[in-house]
Image: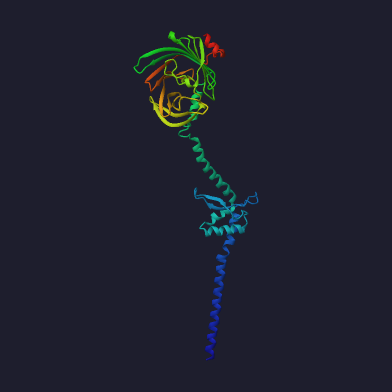
Amino acid sequence: MSKERTNVVVTVIVTVCLTAIVVVAGGWFVATRYLSQPTASAPTEAAAAPAPAPRRKTPPTPKTTVSASSGRQNSSAPNAPAPTGEPGTAENVAARGREEGESPSTAGRLTVAPAAEAEAVPAREEGESTSPAKAVAAQPPAESHDDARTIMEEAQRRTDARSYQYEGLLQAFDSKDKVVEKRWTFARMGSHGQSKVVVRFSAPPEVKGVALLVFNHPDRASDQWMWTPAIERDRRIAFQDRSTRFFGTDFTFEDLEERDVDQFDHSMLGNETIDGIGCWKIQSTPKQTKLSQYSRSITWIRKDNYAPARLDNFVKDEVVRRLTYSAIENIQGIWTARQLEMAELRRGSRTRLTLQQVKYNGPMKEDDFTLQAIRHQ
C-alpha cells in the first residue's frame, strides 16, 4: 500500500515539473518572439537611413494630418514628436503607425525625413493654391469696360486735340419738311473743360457775321457772348436764355457748349445696338455746379471706337431733344461724325449739320477768341 502511494506522489511531482518546464519555455519563446521585436526593428529602421538632426537644426514638426481638400499630408496640428532620429522616437512612431494601419516602412519614412516632408507638402499646397489665382488673373473680366465713368473718360480722351475746326452746312427742317439752309464756321482751341469756341455764320446774308463766343469751364456752365453785326452789339447770354433755339436751328445755346465728363455723374444702363453697332448705354446727370436745362441725358457709346452714336436729352422724364451721329470717319486718328442731326421732339422739327473741311491740331491764335476779335472779323 505504501508502495502505491509512493508511485502516485512521484507521478504528480514529475507532472508538475514537466508542466513548469513547458510554461517557462513557452513564456521565454513568447518573450523573445514578440516582446523584443519593436526594440530590435526600430533601431534597424532608424539606422537604415541618415537622421536629419545632426545635419541641421529643424524646428519641431507639427503632427502630420491629412488635408481634406488635397488628400495629402498636412503639418498644421501641434504636439507632434520632434524629428531627433533617436530609437525611442522611431519606436513611438512605428508603433503609432501600426495602430493607425500604416506599414512599418511608412512609419520609418515619416520618422527619418519629417523635415523634408514638412517642406515638400506646404510647397505643393502653395503651388496648388496660387495656380487657380493665376488662372483667374490671366482672364480679363467679362465686362471690363462696364464702368460708366471710365467709358466716358476714354471716349473724351480719344477726341483730345489742341484745336478743332470745320465748315458746317446746316439744314433746318420744320414739321412739314420745309428746309432752310445756313452755313457756319466752327473753331475750338484748348483742352476739354477749358476750351474756347467761336461759331460764326457765313450764309445766308441776313445772318452773315453773327458770331457766338463760348468759354467752357470744367466746374460750371460756360460763359457765352453773341455778336450781332446788324446792330453792332454784343451781349452776354443769360442762363435763362440758353434753352432757346440758336438762330432758327434746333440747337440751343446750351447744346453748343462742351460736355465735359467731370460735370456729370455717370451710371451704366446696359447695352444696346444702334444701326447694327453694339453700344454702351450710359446715363449722365448734371452735378449741382452744372446749371442745365436738362435733368439728365443718355448717351450711346460705340464699343468698336468709343465714338458717340446717339444722345437723348431729358426734361424730367421726357426726351425733348435727340442728337444722332452718323457718317463716322477716322480723321487724323480721331473718329469723327461728319453728320449730326438734332431733333426737337416736341416741335417735330430737326436740324442736320454736315461737317466739311474738318481739321485737327491746326495753328490758331489765342487772340482770335476774344470779343474784340469776333467784332472785327
Q: In this view, does 105 lie to the left or right of 307?
A: right
Q: How many marks?
A: 0
- From the top left corner, tell me how far across and down residue 117 is, in percent: 57, 49
Q: In this view, does 53 lie above or below 315?
A: below
- From the top left corner, tell me how far across and down residue 310 is, in percent: 42, 24
Which of 107 and 242 lies nearest the eye of the viewer?
242
Q: In this view, does 126 lie above or below 376?
A: below
Q: Residue at x 52, y 43 (%)?
A: 129
Q: Which colour scheme is used?
A: rainbow
Which of 187 and 228 lies nearest the eye of the viewer?
228
Which of 244 and 333 lies nearest the eye of the viewer?
244
Q: Can residue 235 be seen in this view?
A: yes
- From the top left corner, tell me how far across and down residue 107 is, in percent: 55, 55
Q: Which residue is drawn at 45% across and 29% down?
A: 283
Q: Residue at x 58, y 56 (%)?
A: 45
Q: Can residue 113 be seen in this view?
A: no
Q: In this view, does 137 lie above or below 50?
A: above
Q: In this view, does 63 lie to the left or right of 309?
A: right
| Picture quadrant where residue 282 is located | top left
Which residue, as the protein is rendered here, is positioned at the far left? 176
Q: Is residue 120 left or right of residue 338?
A: right
| Picture quadrant where residue 173 is located | top left
- From the top left corner, tell me how far across and down residue 286 is, in percent: 49, 28
Which residue, as the protein is rendered here, is positioned at the far bottom? 1
